[in-house]
Amino acid sequence: MNLAEYIDARRDQHLAELYELLRIPSVSAKSEHKPDIERGANWVAGSLRAAGFKHVEIVPTALHPLVYAESLEAPGKPTILFYGHYDVQPAEPLDLWTSPAFEPTVRNGNLFGRGTADDKGQVHIHLKALESLQKVNGKFPINIKVLIEGEEEVGSVSLWNFVQKNKAKLKADALVVSDTSMLGKCVPSITYGLRGLNYYQIELTGPERDLHSGVYGGAVPNPLTILTELFAKLHDKNFRVAVPGFYDSVSNVSKVERKSLNALPWKKKDFERAVGAPGYFGEKGFTTIERLWTRPTFELNGIWGGYQGEGAKTVIPSKAFAKFSTRLVPNQDPQKIAKLVEKHIRKLLPKTVHWKFEVLSTGKPWVAPYNNPIFKKAQSFHSRGRLHSFRDTNVRHFQSALRFAWLRPARRKRARPRRAHCPRKLFRRHQSCGPFLQ
């Protein structure tokens, strides 16, 4: 039995195993899901053992466990390190899901459920591809290392500590990450750059308790009003981040690279249709694709305070909170940017409120030359059509030869791809970064 026949014969089994993983609500952000996170780690470890890895370990961390496996039985051959994560984001608001978030459901040839496209679907495809190679050939053709973490959605702090302490253990000729995206079906895409991410939280305190606006309104500071005024001052009229020094180290993208990025088959109309906003704007002087992939940003991610229940309550809140983030590009240092942001916020805030500023996580940007040999190898792979007429799957960076339906998050509808391989190859930067690529 050849590889394609082996995979075809086990398609239903592989999908059933994927459903098992998707049913585990491994939400890393919520402490009540700690047992589910541990279930997720154990599931991944079991799948690695089934794939033929003799060395598999679940590594405890200060927060959530990560899973590591290796097979180094191919002397003289390259070593490839696969990275992924088994944790997912919270599924709320639950009422927006057409089907339950943790009950995988197929509609119109697409699989819906939390984690299908970020990142359980890709992790599962990699593991089943490796398992299929090992079962058909009796061994892996190269040396393989696998690292699957459980904190990607909350900043990967434990992963970064593990990487720093285990550089020799994780050494490899190439790292394969399938947690970015493709430009579209039939457009295999190789991501060669990732923006970094700093995540912050701020808390403002005015009065020592909530106050009645009819009694105190107009005479006391309202921290919620002050907080909204603060964020309104953090961009200028050209939508540039108004933090002094924020752009000082930004690496300029060459004219050649900008031309190449803007020549990709990326359609602004499709982007706007998918977003669904009534209008669009961004940093002046750059195209939409450049703003998404090559420019740093400052985004307010959440803001709250005061009364939020049904009906009316005329309250002046004691406290106001916000979560916000900065996306960073090459040469921007996360620690330096965090200090600049804190310094500027301190300058803008009035002395009528107390404030608490926290840096919840940091992540460095990363970029590699898109003529790197490993990228050329992947490009050659697609050019020679080595997918053997397998369906394209939503695996990112390098496409694994597994015949799965496309894996999509809830409420996104796309047609099922044709059963033909697509040899086109494209290089792109991407808009997010996990700290493993630091």
Image (cartoon, rainbow, N blue to C red):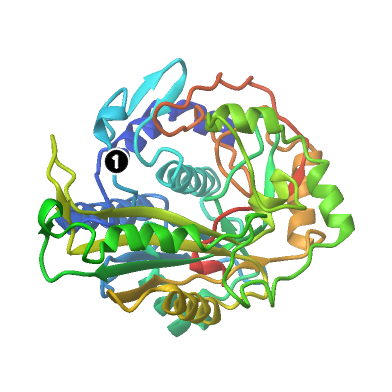
Q: Is residue 282 left or right of residue 88?
A: right
Farthest residue toward the right? 256
Q: Crowding at label 1, few (<14), some or many (≥20) Cα neighbours within 10 Å? A: some
Q: Residue 105: percent from the left, percent from the top? A: 33, 24
Q: Is residue 70 above or below residue 127?
A: below
Q: Out of 269 and 193, give the one closest to the viewer.
A: 269
Q: Is residue 48 left or right of residue 266?
A: left
Q: Quadrant of the C terminus?
A: bottom right
- What's the residue type where badge 1 is placed? Ala
Q: Residue at 21% x, 66% y: name it.
A: 220
Q: Residue at 16% x, 48% y: name it.
A: 307
Q: Is residue 40 above or below residue 94?
A: below
Q: Is residue 130 above or below residue 117?
A: below
Q: Residue 10: percent from the left, percent from the top? A: 43, 30
Query: What number of labels is visible?
Result: 1
Q: Residue at 56% x, 42% y: name it.
A: 395
Q: Residue at 29% x, 75% y: name it.
A: 352
Q: Quadrant of residue 140?
A: bottom right
Q: Quadrant of the N terminus?
A: top right
**Is residue 180 shown to the viewer in this render?**
yes
Residue under label 1:
91
Q: Quadrant of residue 388?
A: top right
Q: Residue 380: percent from the left, percent from the top? A: 80, 47
SS category of the residue bearing label 1: loop
**Is residue 429 shown to the viewer in this render?**
no
Q: Is residue 330 left or right of residue 45?
A: right
Q: Out of 113 and 280, give the one closest to the viewer.
A: 280
Q: Residue 223: percent from the left, percent from the top? A: 27, 64
Q: Out of 40 and 349, give the one closest to the viewer.
A: 349
